[in-house]
Amino acid sequence: MQLPETQVAVLRAADAQSNRDVTDIADELDEQPQAVARAGFELDDRGLASLDERGEETVTLTEEGERYVEEGLPEIALYEAAVDAGAAENPVSLGQLIGEAGLDGDAVDIALANFARKGYGDVESGDVTVDPGADPADDPELRALEALVAGEDVDDESVLDQLDRRGLVERDERTVRSITLTGDGVTALMEGVEAAETVDRLTPELLTSGEWESVEFTDYNVEAAADDIEPGRKHSLREMADRVKDVLVGMGFQEMRGPTVDADFWIHDCLFMPQDHPARTHWDRFAIENPAKIDEIPEDLVERVKAAHRDGVGEDSEGYHSPWDEDFARQLALRGHTTSLTSRHLAGEALGDLEPPQRFFSVEKAYRNDELDATHLLEFFQIEGWVMAEELSVRDLMGTFTEFYEQFGITDLEFKPTYNPYTEPSFELFGRHPETDELIEIGNSGIFRPEMLEPLEVDCDVMAWGLALERLMMLATGAEDIRDVHGTLVDLEYLRTEEVIY
Ligand SMILES: N[C@@H](Cc1ccccc1)C(=O)O
């Protein structure tokens, strides 16, 4: 009889008298367990072997479980401290025992809950009495933990359940497959089996040579168990960024590029942000030490920006009337917003002078020394954008946002007037979170002031915005904590399975 090579090897390795685990056979043959299992299924189909599957439970200790094996269970520490303090005769104050038992933080609650559950004694209005008949030395939970560490089995289901509930063990089901030779298999081996040349995949070579017509293909078993494969994929946030770019390109925008580390001049001064603005202190920005300063900034632009900061522009405008320091403007930092790209483009520094109409965007990272919470990280993706035209109004701004957010199914935007040194009027943008129903801030926007545009020599209207990609993602997907999506606490399962919905 001719069989594919792996099946022959598995048939020879299998035994008629006893079940052999697939993993043992795989070790012996130096094969992948999946390949042996597949051969086993095929031999089973041919009636030459039988493949059996059984569920097997594995129990492993969690970190907390391991710690208790070393340090003892908190409730036993409490019991022992109580016995030492004479709580078998008279109640002893809980406060005193907690110190003596060396318990703190969560361990106190854990000790109390389990002390009471196990009947080690009573806790009433802050006083502890112990049951002298209790026997913590023989605690079944501790003994089970110790047995597991020693690699022994624990059969007591109720103890395992309890340990599981306490989060001290983790229980996993896995499928164990084993193979036994059948009578037909033994006969086949006695009559002789040899390896047939079979082909398990169609290759370009087989096709071009025409050999595919004569070779024998292995059967493909779609039911055979195989390992889960988790191929690399784009981060969900990156996918969202791509989607935003597509939408903006569809709306007629071009993409801006520019430096992540930039001079304060481009990040702040060109935006008519006073040099003593809070965002410019070391509390808020990530300064660069080496190099600490930018070399090149256009001197004539510096002069115009400086004049605007000091005295304003035109008749109705006031400057800050405070000193303006070029050295301060030259300092480098991680950009706190991507509006630095906008100022570089409007100034003609990026692409030369631009004539209206123009539409530009970027979806790039910005960095702020914020406090970390559900909606803030130290870095985030900003969806920067601006439109240059002869005449623009707030309606144009609102209409653009309505059109943009509609593409993500977000239709209930709210606008709130706000203040930016570089825009007037200015609006914060809010959207409603689909899960929590809370209004969350999703962006900031406005129409650039003459104090910003004149020094950059732009003499038409420009409306602009900075929107947070992460917030858009939260609204579009219902994610409630940005840290589940991005950063060191990220939920890998979410990233592996999250679908980006177009
Ligand atoms: N730079 C602003 C966003 C913005 C850009 C352009 C105009 C108005 C606002 C921010 O980071 O919040």
Image (tube, grey):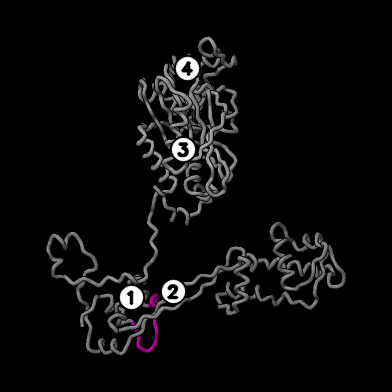
Q: Looking at the image, can residue 430 be seen?
A: yes
How far apart marks 3 and 4 lie (CA) works out to 26 Å
**Residue position for label 4:** 302
The residue depicted at 51 percent of the width and 35 percent of the height is: 443
Q: Looking at the image, can residue 288 be seen?
A: no
Q: Which range is magenta?
A: 14-24
| Number of other residues with Cα within 10 Å of mark 1, as a class: few under 14, some 14 to 19, many 20 or more | some
Given residues 230 and 103, the one toward you in this image is 230
The residue depicted at 76 percent of the width and 76 percent of the height is: 134
User: Mark 2 or mark 4, which is nearer the start of the sequence?
Assistant: 2
How far apart marks 1 and 4 lie (CA) works out to 75 Å
| Number of other residues with Cα within 10 Å of mark 3, as a class: few under 14, some 14 to 19, many 20 or more | some
**Residue position for label 2:** 175
- 276 sits to left or right of 450: right
Q: Which mark is residue 365?
A: 3
**Residue 62 sits above or below residue 437 on the image:** below
Residue type indicated by callout 1:
Leu
Membership of 269 in magenta stretch:
no
